[in-house]
Amino acid sequence: MAEESTPKAGIENIPRTIWWDADETTGRPAVFLIDQTRLPLQGDILQCNVAEGVCVAIGTLAVRGAPALGVAAALALALWSENETEGIDTVDEYLEALDEVSQKVSSARPTAINLMWGAQRIRLLAHDNADLPLAELKELVLQEALNMQSEDEERNRTLGRYGADLLPEKAKVLTHCNAGSLATAYFGTALGVIFTAHEDGKIEHVWVDETRPVNQGGRLTAWELRLANIPSALIADNMAASVMKSGWVDAVIVGADRICANGDTANKIGTYGLAILAAEHNIPFYVAAPTSSIDLTLSTGDQIPIEERDPRELTGFTVGGTFEPDSPEATRAFDLLTESGSYDVPLARGHEMTIHRKGGGYSFDAWFKITPPGIEVYNPAFDVTPANYITAFITEAGVVYPDPDFETAIALATMGSNSIHEIGMRREIAEILASEMPVELSDEGE
């Protein structure tokens, strides 16, 4: 296999994906995130000053990965609360508007349950504390969102420890898509297991599925593993069977966007096929995910909504980069082209390219068509792996085996985890009790 020089780096260099800070110019709160559509060749940071900006980042895959989406949802609502509520004077008005924003955030992408979980956790916390003065309620919302960001890292490190203990010495692992630090607030789920095992000296090699059509494996996972100085190689998705047959895979570890009550699991398209291949070759197939990705409100994977993405992801490919002109004449030419902003290069046959100014140089974004005109496209972003192909789930609550069955084991593992079904159940129980009792419930009563 082809090799390149490996950078001298380690686990400490893996990226932090999304965080809360202040706008340097105004001092007002902002949400900052790595623009993952630009990686690995550009390291652009997006600054979102309003909740709508976070929603756009979610929809365009600038931020992605189920745990990261849960944190993004919470921070989006906190951002709205801090920056967009100046005309709201009462708690009732605040809660009504919060519900609307929460619905918009939750619907930015349909499959990952964490997005809804993050928004619901903030929304219901606010409703449950409606007796507070408005200023204190806003502070509570902000603190909860920041807590969720910290909790995500803690959960990932814990599940990483559980998962690392499952792997043999000199483990050769195959992973799909990106379930690394970029898919979380920090550290990662499937890659969190690999990072932890690497620190234990147990990882011999990692196979990285390219993950068509958006190439999250080739662009993101491969980049994170190189930053962490973990031996790895990139393969096309259709090469997985071959490396398994060769005996070069000891375990498959993937993340999850939603796990149903019976263990059926939605993850990036191609995961189902990997699970079948792993079963055929007697290789353990692990799903690493926090309990926030578990949705006991759905009994089977048939009920999971599957997002369909832009057909252009299949009919062409996107490239981007930066450049500096190699002469004063070229600089003047590009300055002239971009003096009014971006310049759309006139290309034939459906190709597209836009040039922008960027610092002392320029950047470009392009899409090049590679398929026949008018071709029909089916482009689901996820597939569902039936539970019977899954060896175990690796969560922060421990490793969940199908003993006596996944439905029972998963329900026990999520008890007290504050996952989506528990948030809804607590709210429903509180409303029922409140309607039946003549006095208002105290905190102890709940």
Image (spheres, rainbow, N blue to C red):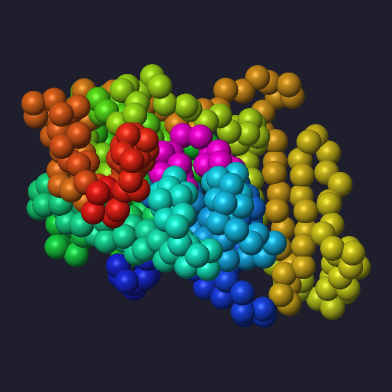
Q: Which residue sits at x=19%, y=27%?
A: 407
Image spot of residue 209 (x, y percent): 38, 41
Find out whether residue 217 is within the magenta segment.
no
Instruction: Magenta stretch: give its range.
Output: 103-119
Magenta segment's dominant SS is helix
Image spot of residue 385 (x, y percent): 32, 26
Q: Is residue 174 visible?
A: no
Q: Is residue 199 visible?
A: yes
Image spot of residue 400 (x, y percent): 15, 38
Say whether residue 17 is left or right of residue 404.
right
Image spot of residue 58 (x, y percent): 56, 48
Find out whether residue 105 is within the magenta segment.
yes
Say whether residue 349 is left or right of residue 124.
right
Say whether residue 203 is left or right of residue 129.
left
Q: Is residue 9 above or below residue 212?
A: below
- The image quadrant of residue 197 is bottom left
